């Protein structure tokens, strides 16, 4: 296990180029994955959120899709990389950046994470989950997308990615345990990203495959307990 933390300030300028190179097997357009995840999220939600936090937003790959999918919501972005947040401020002026999460206790209806937890050293994941729990409103929702460690193509992509150096992927069961310990009840989990963009017409089949650990990623939805 590695406790090394990647400094994402070093990758702000060429993050998208690096990511597109890593994901070229699945899609010629990196944006495909961001749009895909937000559509899954929107389909899974019961109610329209009014305040949304993209936790670990990086340079904002998900932000334009969140804005488009939830036009009536206030969208926020947080990240440990100040340089990434400055990039977001420059490129997504409608999004509010968050530098001090402790000021936002019980503030968000929805907290969204895409590929964040595996970048946290295993020893620090419980604390990060508590931090996520603290900013969700009672009864609010968290949606977490993570790499599927049982998919060999995913493991290969991660092993060759410079900003994934030394990361430890987290299985779905372990993520659900972290959520439960932080008083976030998992309500829905599913494997996803079974087909590359060239086979996007097969995506309707994914609803029949969601229980099989074959997809490139998985996601977990959870609700914060009404009473802490």
Image (tube, rainbow, N blue to C red):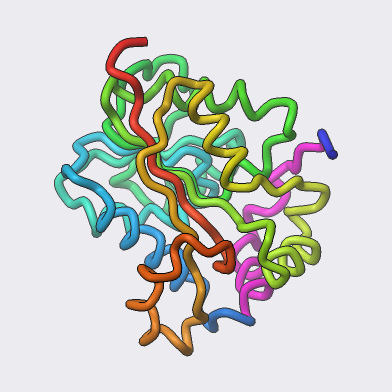
Q: Is residue 226 left or right of residue 205?
A: left
Residue at (44, 46) in percent of width and height: 220
- For the C terminus, the image quarter is top left
Instruction: State the image coordinates of residue 18 (x, y, percent, origin top left).
Output: 68, 67
Instruction: State the image coordinates of residue 138 (x, y, percent, origin top left).
Output: 28, 20
Residue at (38, 53) in percent of width and height: 63
Residue 140's quadrant in the figure? top left
- For the N terminus, the image quarter is top right
The one nearer the camera, 106 or 16, is: 106
Instruction: State the image coordinates of residue 113 (x, y, percent, origin top left).
Output: 47, 44
The correct choice, above or below, for 40 with respect to 7 in the image is: below
Q: Give yes or no for residue 149 being in the magenta stretch.
A: no
The one nearer the camera, 101 or 187, is: 187
The one nearer the camera, 219 or 124, is: 219
Instruction: State the image coordinates of residue 61 (x, y, percent, origin top left).
Output: 47, 58
Residue at (82, 33) in percent of width and height: 3
- Residues in magenta, as a range: 4-24
């Amino acid at each position: 296990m590695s406790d090394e933390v990647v400094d994402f300030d070093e990758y702000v300028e060429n993050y998208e180029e690096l990511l597109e190179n890593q994901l070229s097997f699945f899609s010629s357009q990196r944006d495909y994955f961001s749009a895909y995840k937000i559509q899954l999220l929107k389909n899974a939600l019961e109610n329209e959120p009014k305040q949304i936090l993209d936790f670990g937003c990086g340079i904002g790959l998900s932000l334009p899709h969140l804005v488009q999918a939830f036009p009536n919501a206030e969208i926020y972005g947080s990240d440990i990389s100040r340089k990434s947040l400055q990039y977001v401020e420059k490129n997504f002026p409608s999004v509010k950046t968050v530098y001090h999460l402790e000021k936002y206790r019980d503030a968000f209806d929805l907290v969204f994470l895409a590929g964040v937890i595996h970048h946290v050293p295993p020893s620090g994941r419980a604390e990060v989950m508590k931090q996520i729990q603290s900013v969700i409103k009672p009864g609010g929702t968290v949606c977490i997308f993570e790499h599927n460690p049982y998919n060999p193509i995913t493991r290969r992509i991660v092993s060759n990615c410079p900003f994934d150096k030394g990361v430890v992927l987290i299985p779905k069961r372990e993520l659900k345990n972290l959520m439960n310990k932080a008083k976030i009840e998992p309500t829905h989990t599913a494997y996803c990203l079974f087909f590359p963009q060239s086979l996007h017409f097969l995506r309707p089949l994914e609803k029949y495959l969601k229980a099989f650990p074959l997809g490139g990623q998985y996601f977990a939805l959870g609700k914060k307990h009404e009473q802490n």
